[in-house]
Image (tube, rainbow, N blue to C red):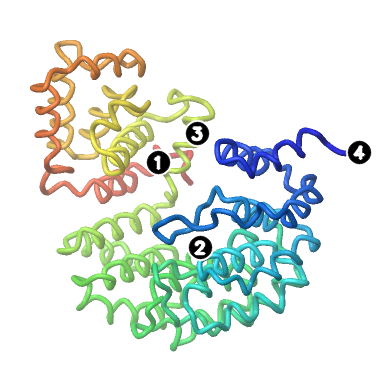
Amino acid sequence: MPDPNIQGLVEGLFAPDRAYECGRRLNLEDLAPSALPYLLAAMRDPRVTSGVTLDNGFLNYQAPLISISGLLGKSGSPEAAAPLLDLLNHPEARVREHIGMCLAELAQPNCIEAVTQLLASDDREVRQWAMCGIGHAVNGKLAAPEFLQAIWPCLVPLLRLEDRFGFGYAPKLVAQIDAVSAASILLDAKVLSLDNPLLERVIEALNESQIPIPHEILLPLIAQLEPVAHEHPRDSQLAEALLAYARNPDAGTESRLRGFLHSSSESLQAGSAKALASFYGIEDQHSKLCDLENEKGIAALTDAERNYFTASIYYYEIMNGGPWQYIGNSTADYHVQIIEGLRAIGAHNTAQVLVELGRVFGPSGPSANRGLRNDQADAFTEQQAGAIGCLYEEFPSAGENIEMLLDLYAAANAADFPHCK
């Protein structure tokens, strides 16, 4: 029997004022499989081709063709492939790239031939979007094993080909799909080489897949990177190599990692601190503590974990959107605890800036209630608003590498991070 709810949502994809919400509900409520007959019918609707691109040439993601094809890609049904295959010759290049991603995300046996051709394309944009789709399929556990088995050899030649935005999908996909077979390929001297523009992503893929890099390969690589680590991306490549070293240590690991804390590259300083935390068994602490706080509240964290959590959420909030975003979001509910956290990790000057921000609100500081705090900010005078702008002309304070200080604090207090091991 027809489902009027799903039918209404699919029809809403053709209405500009409803398209976003209808697409969101079909996606978030996992209705795409049930909606498949309606989506396939919608692809035959004459209205589906309208408004595909914006005036600036970019895709209109609210356009019916784009939103419906995206939902078909998430359906996991081989039936969804036919209308997508028909669109691979669309006159708009951006549409072709999007459809290629949808086919790769669908990841069914009848997509193999088309996706194989996309991965062999001379156009790196086409290759990149196809790999992006495969990544969605792998992460969503929707890909057919037959598809992955056929596609894996097509990814291997891409391990040394730079993509436009530096995402480096190929190494990660090769390792995710078949870590056992990937190990020898990713450890090959031609792949794990300074000549490879995807070197950082190769090491990252090895790390994420828990594939240790033997010392006879890793130590010479670190030695090659060290003299050029003041340059980007060599600093990031070396930072990733140091994480691999921390996970597969020898007697000299800790002292070597600490030596890189004095690098002229802040990225390498942070990378070496992250490696030290890993050396002491602490990894992914930011995400783990955020999840724990979200699930059980801040009281579930130890004192050391709370210091790390509050200092880190403040740092990333400011880096993402500045002081006004901090004030407006729930992060500032922890204003007092953040100051304590910053001082605990050794970021005293950065903590003092936050103290000064609190004084702009008056003697009692910002309210711990988000709504009341926003009312306070809305009532600021031009002078108060200007004072906050001046405080954050430089962030973080000079000489305070917050990412390094956070991970050094975790390493020094590893026993007090029970939720991060």
Looking at the image, which residue is at 61% across and 81% down? 154
Q: Amino acid at mark 3?
A: Leu
What is the spatial separation of the Cα atoms under label 1 and label 3, in whole angstroms?
A: 18 Å
Displayed quadrant of residue 90: bottom right
Looking at marks 3 and 4 on the same chain, the residue that comes earlier in the sequence is marked by 4
Could you tell whether 297 is left or right of 310 in the image?
right
Query: Sequence-wise, which precedes: disc 1 or disc 4?
Result: 4
Mark 1 vs mark 4, CA separation in Å: 59 Å
Residue that numbered label 2 is attached to: 208
Pick the residue in front: 113 or 228. Answer: 113
Q: Which mark is residue 415?
A: 1
Q: CA distance from mark 3 to mark 2?
A: 22 Å
The answer to whether the residue labelled 3 contacts the one labelled 4, judged by CB atoms less than 8 Å apart, is: no
Q: Residues within 10 Å of mark 4 (few under 14, many from 20)?
A: few
Which residue in the protein does label 3 denote? 292
Nearer the observer, 97 or 145: 97
CB contact under 8 Å: marks 2 and 1: no
Measuring 54% from the left and 29% from the top, which residue is drawn there? 295
Q: For this rendering, which residue is in front, 67 or 232?
A: 67
In terms of secondary structure, where does tag 4 sit?
loop
Please report whichever mark, 4 or 2, sits nearer to the chain's N-terminal start. 4
Nearer the viewer's eye, disc 1 or disc 3?
A: 3
- Type of residue at label 1? Ala
Disc nearer the start of the sequence (1/3): 3
Q: Position of residue 82 (x, y in %)?
A: 76, 67
Q: Tell me the crowding category of disc 3: few under 14, some 14 to 19, or many 20 or more residues within 10 angstroms, Cα based.
A: some
Residue 110 occupies which quadrant of the picture?
Answer: bottom right
